[in-house]
Image (cartoon, coloured by chain):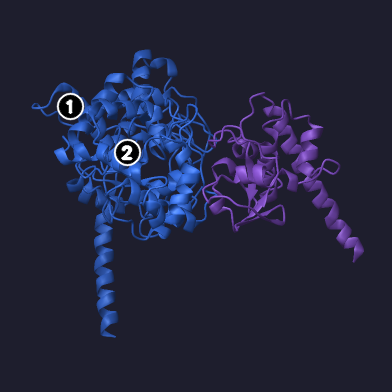
Chain colours: A blue, B purple
Amino acid sequence: MRLRHTLLGLLSVALLGAAGFFYFAEQPELPVSKPPDKASFDGALIAKGAELAMIGNCNVCHTNSDGLSYAGGRPLETPFGIIHATNITPDPETGIGAWSEAAFLRAMREGVRRDGAHLYPAFPYDHFTKVTPGDLRAIYAFLMTRDPVRARTPPNTVPFPFSVRPLIAAWKLLYFEPGEHKADPVLSAELNRGAYLTEGLAHCGACHTPRNMLGAERNNRYLAGGEVENWHAPALNAASTAPVPWTREQLFTYLRTGFVTPHGVAAGPMQPVVNNLATVAEQDVKAIAAYIGAILGPPTAGRQERGPKAESTSDSRALGGQDVIANADGAVIYAGACAFCHEASGQRFSVKGIHLASSKVITMPDARNLAHVILEGIVPPHASPAALMPGFADALTDSQLAALMTYLRRTFSSQPAWSGLEDKIREARRPPKGS
Amino acid sequence: MPTLNVNGRSHQFEADGATPLLYVLRDDLGLNGAKFGCGLGQCGACTVLMDDKPVLSCITPITVALSRRITTLEGLGTFDNPGVVQRAFIAEQAAQCGFCIAGMIMRAEALLRRNPAPSDKEIRGHMSPNLCRCGTHMRILAAVRRAAGTIRSAAADSAPSKETRR
């Protein structure tokens, strides 16, 4: 009885608080505007906006399953439910045709829809707020000159309480820091450009920074490794487990083409990113590479040595070495399925897989990426000279895959064995929700 | 001695566990339907079914195939009595040099066993790992559509006949 009173009391306080909060959380609706005449935009501005939109990866989320760019509809799986990317073509009814430039700038900088509703931070306005108004105007010019596509965005399936949009205002109070990026006078122009793009439009941290319980990026663990579409987004800071330390030049080639020796091919959710970066100004990709390189920091002497050392020791252990006996199943599967392309002795024709001792995914703290790569294979990114890796989803059972992965981890990395490997494999096999 | 279950029959042979399934099929069992194309899982000429799913037998070590049900081209029909998918490929004259066709038929078979009414997008997506250097893709697609139609109409024919029998 007493408990019930306490609960009732708490509930009424909460309701009163909520009423006050909702009043505070309200944002004005901006007037419906007539879709601007395409000819009213300057050609150079549109071209600039096109490149910026590529750096911002707008097309990655805002493209529907028919491949219609910017028509939206793609389901994004978040811990809070499935959120659909919206139609950002200038269709007045189903897209952003009725949005004035001011409404677009407000959405990008403050995360508020034209009608005043708060946008979910799945739309990374916590990064876009750093973009200059000049760049945002160019993106607006680019988007408003696309062909309008009539495509209604499917409703989100976000359960209560996350379905209450005004609550996003509370989230913003806690975690959202609006404001343009500020250049650091100590850094070079290139590093400043890289920081501006990486932290702003390119929103690298949206995937590569871990998030807290309420889905906000943990700024004290900036680029320390995050989560995206059931893949692990690897750490881009000193926590990187890449067996061979990345150089700035390697980062550039990887971001530009999707492949660099010895690190390998961009796979999974990174592929559309490198496909976009292949189309933009080279100096912008160089700037991003320089900035990420600076965050990674110079490798320690020990790490510097680790890569080549790993390659030479694993050579003797693979195929016919001692480890074959120690992990029979995995070693036999490796010899029959992987070695043809990944072993120097087995490489024939022009197909050369990377040496697995320099593989990024075998050393990662999360086993899912290696599981994804083996199960699904890798169709190389557009600009990459890498060969196709076939997938083994239908060839290997979960336990066979676990044996293979255990063998690879032990043979080609100095990292401890993965725990809960079979669960990770089941997770990697799970088809995405909402599609 | 390891045993493989191929086309409903058990076969015993001697080979190391890492030996590609393709080598055992061709060299030990004399089943030459699956072809050696690239030997690197790039072309699909070696496609066979393992538990009804398409696998590239040139990079599938036999150790993972021992407890599974393998189906090769020889398991779909004979020269005198070809299977549904084989007949469709013949009717559409899908083969030019024909080297890729065994793999194409097996991959198509896997799709139609799972889904006898695939959309064109599904057919193209499913068949995409298999390459044809002659360029008969349009005829291959037509053959897959024809086979799907045959399977569906056979299913439709057999359904009412059960009714009349009752």
Q: Secondary structure at mark 1?
A: helix
Q: Is residue A408 above or below residue A89?
A: below
Of labels 2 and 1, the one closer to you: 2
- Left or right relative to A135: residue B49: right
Residue A211, label in figure: none
Residue furthest to the bottom: A1
Q: Position of residue A24 (x, y in %)?
A: 24, 51
Asked if both marks, 2 and 1, belong to the same chain, the answer given is: yes
Identify the residue at image location x=52%, y=33%: A67
Residue A192, label in figure: 1
Q: Quadrant of the C terminus of chain B?
A: bottom right
- Left or right relative to A244: residue B9: right
Q: Position of residue A343 (x, y in %)?
A: 41, 37
Q: Position of residue A60 (x, y in %)?
A: 42, 35
- Residue closer to the observer: A136 or A354: A354
Q: Is residue A65 visible?
A: yes
Three-letter amino acid code at the position of disc 1: Asn
Three-letter amino acid code at the position of disc 2: Ser
- In the figure, residue A96 lies in which quadrant? top left
Q: Position of residue A296 (x, y in %)?
A: 20, 37
- Considering only order in the chain, which callout, 1 or 2, is on the residue closer to the N terminus? 1
Q: Secondary structure at mark 2?
A: helix
Q: Quadrant of the N terminus of chain B?
A: bottom right
How far separated are the C-alphas under marks 2 and 1? 31 Å
Q: Crowding at label 1, few (<14), some or many (≥20) Cα neighbours within 10 Å?
A: many
Q: Which residue is mark 2?
A: A358
- Residue closer to the observer: B9 or A221: B9
Identify the residue at image location x=30%, y=27%: A136
Q: Crowding at label 2, few (<14), some or many (≥20) Cα neighbours within 10 Å?
A: many
Chain hosting mark 1: A
- Left or right relative to A161: residue A110: left
